[in-house]
Amino acid sequence: MLRGQINVKGYATPRQFSGFQIPIPLQSAAIRRYCDERGLVFNHHVVENVFPGTFLVLERIVAEAHLFQAMAMCSISMLPNDSARRTNLLDRCVNVGMTVHFLFESLIVSSREDIAVVNELLSLTGLLKDDLNRVRLMRDFLTPE
Amino acid sequence: MHHTSFLTKEDRDRAEQFLNNGYIIHACESMDSLHELRGTIMNQANEWLAEHHEKSRIVSLADSHQVVPEERINELRLRLFTGLNANPDTRLSYFSLASNLIQSLVGNELAMQNKVNVSIQQPLDQSSVLELHSDVWTGDSPFQVVLWVPLTDASDTNAMFLLSPSESRVAYKKSRQGELDSMAAIHEAYKSQFRPIEVRYGEVLLFDSNCLHGNQLNTTTTTRWSFNCRFVSLLAPSTTPERRLGSFYTPIMVRPATVMGIRAVEALGLVD
């Protein structure tokens, strides 16, 4: 690796996230393109395990964060649902200076303020996930009998 | 409906106009911001011209077609889009053009589209014609409004047209029933009703994303430049994964009660 280059580890998941089910090659291609457009060095992606609720592969990237300057994945919704666990994971990245890039939300986490932004977005989307039922409730309430 | 008695008369009149027509035109609330945005766009466009060894410069956006080659207009537009959105203050400036109007019609807890879009429609340029469409039909939130701001006076065929909410709903119903089986068929059925919405520089247009709208071939002698960006109530439901907080919108106004509620819900373990 040349001095000054930013080495990015790609992270993909076979699990559904945020309503999307995106083939791994497409996630990887998106990350590669993201890196190319920004002059970052793409490192071959790794893939999370398929069984729900585990982040064994993500945790390994974070444990080896000193090897990379950055990690990139498609969306913040690929992170752990549990906010304490998610915050701890991102904190560890920030502490060793590894930035985390999220393509869909165009977010880069490099500080605790950035972690707070991610958490707020995920809290709001988590609260709003039963969207169509809320629309029914609103419609029924507002429609005159 | 009982809740309208809590609104001011001004808000009620505005609401009625907006819900009936599908749009409202209003004076820009911050001319300083508008002038600044226009100046920035013009400077960036002239930088692009200089980089591409074009000798001429844009003096007036309405006459930009005299110096910008038609075959490179999209290249320029993408450059301006990137430059505009690289500036972290752009969205705040854009919101200030109609912040009271948006809050009146949408609410005071808001999310805003992540990017501000730039549109350039040069005379006789077929490539910049935006066919009839509805943002909501292609997945945007049904609760969304679009703030459309011209940088040049828009009228006649360099303005956009919009079908009313009621006509748009009828068109949708006919398409579901098979009576109109393509967007082209819908266009053909309704083209006699296309009326350009005249909006002058210094005014803003806020419209209902559910309405079918588009533009036509610009047969005037002036180029139309405009911005557009979408706003939605922070707590409004989304109907597709792609058009939601984070990937498409970012919260811009979150009131303390919502923050308080989020903290409580998490502390109590009420959501996964």
Image: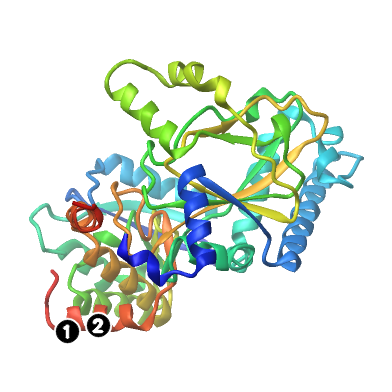
Quarter of the image for residue B139 reads: top left
In the visual, does B95 lie left or right of B32?
left
| Residue annotated with mark 2 | B263
Residue type beneath disc 2: Arg
Task: Name the residue at 31% across, 75% down.
Answer: A90
Compute the Cα span from label 1 to label 2: 6 Å
Residue B154's x, y, as percent?
72, 41
Labels in figure, total:
2
The quarter of the rendered structure image containing the N terminus of chain B is bottom left
Toward which corner of the image does residue B38 lie, by quadrant? bottom right
Q: Residue furthest right?
A: B55
Q: Quadrant of residue B245?
A: bottom left
Residue bearing mark 1: B267
Front-lying residue, A97 or A14? A14
CB-based contact (under 8 Å), mark 1 and mark 2: yes
Q: Residue at x 65, y 33 (%)?
A: B196
Q: Mark 2: give few (<14), some (14-19) or many (20+) Cα within 10 Å.
A: some
